[in-house]
Amino acid sequence: MYSPYGLEVSDSCLECKIRSSGYFCEFDAELVKAFESLKYATVFPKGAVLFVEGQSPRGVFMICSGRVKLTTCSVDGKALITRIAEGGEVLGLSSAVSGRTYMVTAETLVPCQVNFIKRDDFLRFLKENGAACLRVAEHLSNNYNNAFEQVRSLGLSHSASEKLAKLMLEWCAKDGKETAAGIGLKLTLTHEEIAQLIGASRETVTRLLADFKRKQMISVKGSTLIIRDKPKLLAMVTS
């Protein structure tokens, strides 16, 4: 079944055809059934806000499909994207468990199917199911490691160009596809969003992309990014 946004959706977790390898997608049938009885499934368009930084935790949001950017803002309004979450991930988990306010704002980058579970229902589900508690611990541990890697990347990189090169290499490793022209990637982020990922200004990202093109390290056609010279990018982050 498809949503009005052209997104393939599934009403049942047990019969889901888009089921990912996420932390809560791999429960046995009984746990999946119990999980499903608590959820509220919704399809969101691009640009929908799931929750806002500083808001009291209403519950957790499990991404069935799509991509969601997590953003934090300083008092002067400067934004930093802390992570791009994808299918199988659960958002708001730390806040739901601790009772503290959401630490980031979650906004869909593309149409997404999301399962929402109220905080009280979710906590009760954890108390009654040890396997679910273990998955939560794994998820929180993974989030901690991701946060550490981001802090190390932002703090130890010497320049914006090195940070951008690192980001492109991460994209290559995760989603890159070999083509005759180089490694192909789908570029779904704006220059502003890329800037928020690496802690730079939009103008800096635009200038660096133009410089990378001039040096024939990359090429961009529409929404397709081609990494033409991966060794040059590697040299930028290892020098």
Image: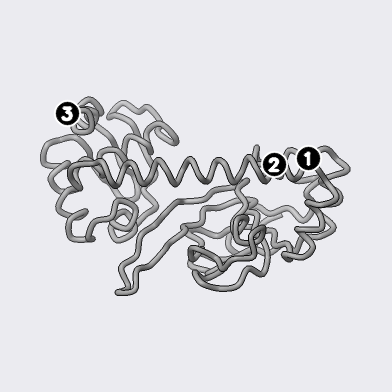
Query: What residue is shown at x 73% (from left), y 38% (from top)?
Result: 26
The C terminus - image quarter: top left
Per the model, the C-alpha gap separating discs 1 and 2 is 6 Å
In screen coordinates, is 152 left or right of 125?
Answer: left
Percent from the top left, x then y, of residue 45? 55, 66
Helix, strand or loop status at disc 2: helix
Three-letter amino acid code at the position of disc 2: Arg
Taking depth in this image into account, of 230 and 128 the one nearest to the observer is 128
**Pointer 2: what residue?**
135
Q: Is residue 75 above or below residue 213?
A: below
Residue at label 1? Answer: 131
Q: Residues within 10 Å of mark 1 (few under 14, many from 20)?
A: few
Q: Which residue is mark 3?
A: 239
Mark 2 vs mark 3: which is more N-terminal?
A: 2
Residue at 14 percent across and 53 percent down: it is 207
Secondary structure beneath label 3: loop
